[in-house]
Image: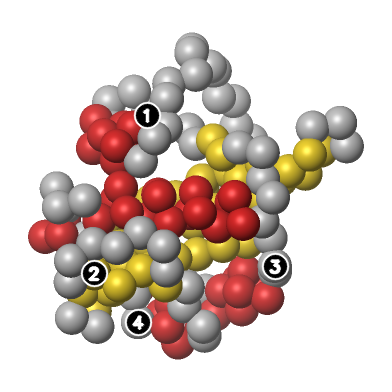
Amino acid sequence: MSERLRGVDIRRPETVHDIEAAAHLFDDPPDPEATARFLATPTHHILFAYEDAQPVGFVTGVEETHPDKGTEMFLYELAVDEEARNRGIGRALVAALVTVARARGCYGMYVFTDRDNVAAQRAYTAAGGVEAGEHVMLEWEFE
């Protein structure tokens, strides 16, 4: 794709099966219907890192457009297999999503992470992200 890391290939999966083959990287097993919808939506992005043809990490992003601001990329999730961590794969995945965001005309990209998620913060800053200050995240959970 864009970011090259020795022995690691970063690319967008083409099929639901490609994502199901990487189920071990997700919090829960991917739902085939949700996966198909995600892949069919042009403003939703997923990139996998493959090592020896095996998926070892992924990043997802969603383009968000607002009438007076334009479009920015929300980095939704980053995951790297425990055995593949601390080798630059997370940074390379984030950098690859930055490349997608720029190519799609996004004016910027953002992500939220927990204050104690040091590994994620390292990956984000290594890929050029800067802390934007103190924010409060509120959420709604629907049953």
Relative to 34, residue 73 above or below: above
- Give the CA distance from mark 4 to mark 3: 22 Å
Tag 1: residue type? Asp
Relative to 51, residue 63 above or below: above
Bin the neighbour count of mark 4 within 10 Å (Cα to Cα): few under 14, some 14-19, many 20 and up.
few
Task: Report helix, strand or loop for mark 1.
Answer: loop
Tag 2: residue type? Val
Bin the neighbour count of mark 1 within 10 Å (Cα to Cα): few under 14, some 14-19, many 20 and up.
few
Which residue in the structure is indicated by mark 1? 114
Left/right placement of residue 56 relative to residue 45 reads left
Q: Residue furthest left?
A: 83
Q: Pick whichever of labels 1 and 4 is earlier in the sequence.
A: 4
Seen at 21% across and 51% down, the residue is 88
Seen at 67% across and 38% down, the residue is 107
Expressed as whole percent of the image width and height from the top left, the position of residue 1 reads 42, 69
Q: Pick whichever of labels 4 and 3 is earlier in the sequence.
A: 4
Q: Is residue 27 visible?
A: no
Seen at 59% across and 50% down, the residue is 102
Which residue in the structure is indicated by mark 4? 21
